[in-house]
Image: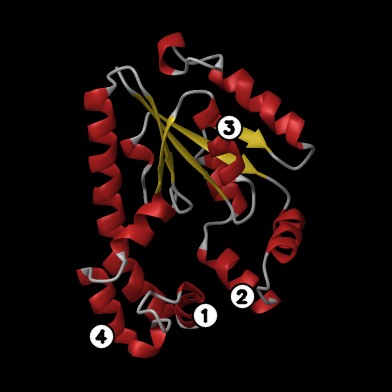
Amino acid sequence: MAWRIGLTGGLACGKSTIAAWMAEAGAHIIDADLLAREIVRPGTPALEAIVAHFGPQILNPHGVLDRAALRRRVFADAQARAWLEALLHPAIRAAMIAASARIAAAHPDALIVWVVPLLVEGDYGALVDQVVVVDCLPEQQIARVKARSDWSDAQIRAVLAAQCDRATRLAAADVVIDNSGAPAAAHRQLREFLATLPPHSCPNP
């Protein structure tokens, strides 16, 4: 039977790295952020609703959603963020469930990893068999975001504030991968976890 892992973590804790390693081990990855991009691609009802709500300036010159502009809008306005979440989150959830069902039908023994930044906040725990939280120190989160982006301190604080607190996230975990040290240490923790799964679900632990 397919085994579903919910993979989450705070901003810049290293979810994408862990997901990539899990894919190398043979897992099937379903990424909520990638599905969200599909849901708002040009011509979709979701993008039309976003333009109607926020105005055409939310698009770039090619008619594609300007994600940076939208992020600035919604993280500066709680009501705007709530509206956007009400629009997108049910669609993302439905897309993840459908993708998982397709994979399980084609690969009955698959290890399916749902990568969901707001897994705890969106109550995805009931939809997966185990929740894996990637964790690091809060000051490391901020430093990593600054190293990889041009976000302002205010933007970083706003995104962090929109996520559940670290203690709540850790309390929801079945497994915690500490990514506050060297990558090799996190990789070792992941391999140890994968080794606990049924052998058929993860062919290359």
Mark 2 and mark 3 lie on one chain; the one further toward the N terminus is 3
Q: Label 2 to label 3, Cα distance in Å?
A: 29 Å
- Secondary structure beneath disc 1? helix
Write down the quadrant of residue 147 in the picture: bottom right
Please provide percent x and percent y for residue 149: 67, 67
- Secondary structure beneath disc 2? helix
Residue 171 left/right relative to 12: left
Label pair 2/4, CB-CB below 8 angstroms: no
Mark 3 and mark 1 lie on one chain; the one further toward the N terminus is 3
Mark 2 and mark 1 lie on one chain; the one further toward the N terminus is 1
Q: Label 1 to label 4, Cα distance in Å?
A: 17 Å
Label pair 2/3, CB-CB below 8 angstroms: no
- According to the image, label 4 marks what residue? 52
- According to the image, label 1 marks what residue? 72
- According to the image, label 3 marks what residue? 21
Please provide percent x and percent y for residue 56: 34, 88
Q: Amino acid at mark 3?
A: Trp
Nearer to me, 23 or 75: 23
Q: Residue at x 34, y 86 (%)?
A: 54
Q: Amino acid at mark 2?
A: Gln
Quarter of the image where the N terminus is located: top left
Q: Residue at x 70, y 75 (%)?
A: 153
* Closer mark to the observer between disc 2 and disc 4: 4
Write down the quadrant of residue 152 in the picture: bottom right
* Closer mark to the observer between disc 3 and disc 1: 3
- According to the image, label 2 marks what residue? 155
Q: Amino acid at mark 4?
A: Ala
Label pair 2/1, CB-CB below 8 angstroms: yes
